[in-house]
Amino acid sequence: MELDPEIVPELQKRAAANAGVVLPQRGDALGLRALIEARQADSYAALPPAPDVAVSRHHADGIELRWYAPADGGTGAAVVYVHGGGMIAGTLDGYDPLLRHYTRLAGVPFLAVGYRRAPEHAGTGPAQDAFAALCWLIERADGLDVDGRRIALMGDSGGGGIAAGAAIMARDEGVPVARQVLVYPMLDDRTVVPDPALAATATWSYDDNWTAWTAVLGTDRGRPDVPAVAAPARLAELAGLAPAYVEVGELDIFRDECLAFATRLLAAGVSCELHVRPGAPHGFEWLAKEADVSRRAVADRVRVIRSL
């Protein structure tokens, strides 16, 4: 397997920009947080502006929420969005251009969740925050012109894992979720042993994953009793979960855990649309925005959101 040739130049630019930069050591969660947020700021700031998207701020159970509404108000569907960052990084300010972009493209309102991050808020805490945001939106659905049964949970990377954890909570609590949209989700705390075929092109490394999962789970990382709400790959019974969209690059270290999760969803009778993007590493679509594989990925996500 080889990197998509349209992605290679962007990776080379990143490597040149990192020349001489001291990267965080394995286990330095706060140093990794700073690096992630700097990269996210660079990636999302270059997205086209969406001044017609209205944004309002709210709070629920101690977390900040931001409501992104399209100019026409939407179609009655909505998305609760959980930002990426390995469950240790990412901010609502940093993700603001991306949420505006998705809202404009899909014509559907988004509720961005300012969940509390590990290591300060670890274990199942981030998923509990995302679930609280879902409940907040359902309770206020009528006032926001939203159909409470047409709300999706969506997230990328660490946020995808958190969204999947919130979907487990929703199933167990009898709270409706129309779909879970999981973009290269971080699902399994055991993905820390390097696969040489993937390690060489990893934009999110096995050391990064070890650092992040250790921040989330501490000394419990890798042990048998890790809660599925924190690491959804640990879930024993998947029946009854919301229908899913799962997407991952074939050169992403999350590939195998995403494939396994999607396969187990299908085996449990849960509808699942799965995409494996050829030649793509983690975070490919915002690294190389004009690449054909990136355009296809974003188009598929928008299609699914519009179908809610």
Image (spheres, rainbow, N blue to C red):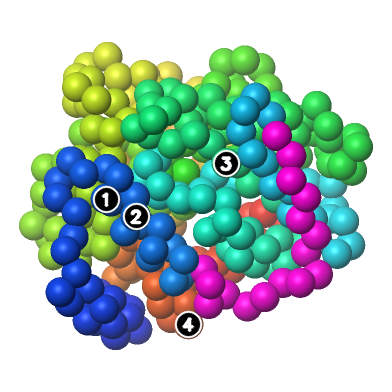
- Residue located at (34% from left, 55% from top): 34
**Disc nearest the viewer among 3 and 4:** 3
Q: Are marks 2 and 1 in contact (CB under 8 Å)?
A: yes
120 above or below 55?
above
Residue at which label 4 appears = 290
Whether residue 145 is visible, yes or no, is yes
Residue 148 on image: x %, y %: 80, 33
Residue at which label 2 appears = 34
Instruction: Give residue 114's mark.
Output: 3
Give the side of residue 191 with respect to residue 175, left or right: left
- Residue located at (64% from left, 39% from top): 64
Residue 192 on image: x %, y %: 16, 41
Residue at which label 1 appears = 31
**Disc nearest the viewer among 3 and 1:** 1
- The magenta segment is 44-59
Q: Quadrant of residue 29?
A: top left
- Residue located at (28% from left, 82% from top): 13
149 above or below 229?
below
Q: Are marks 3 and 4 in contact (CB under 8 Å)?
A: no
Label 2 to label 4, Cα distance in Å?
26 Å
Instruction: First in sequence, mark 3 or 1: give its number.
Output: 1
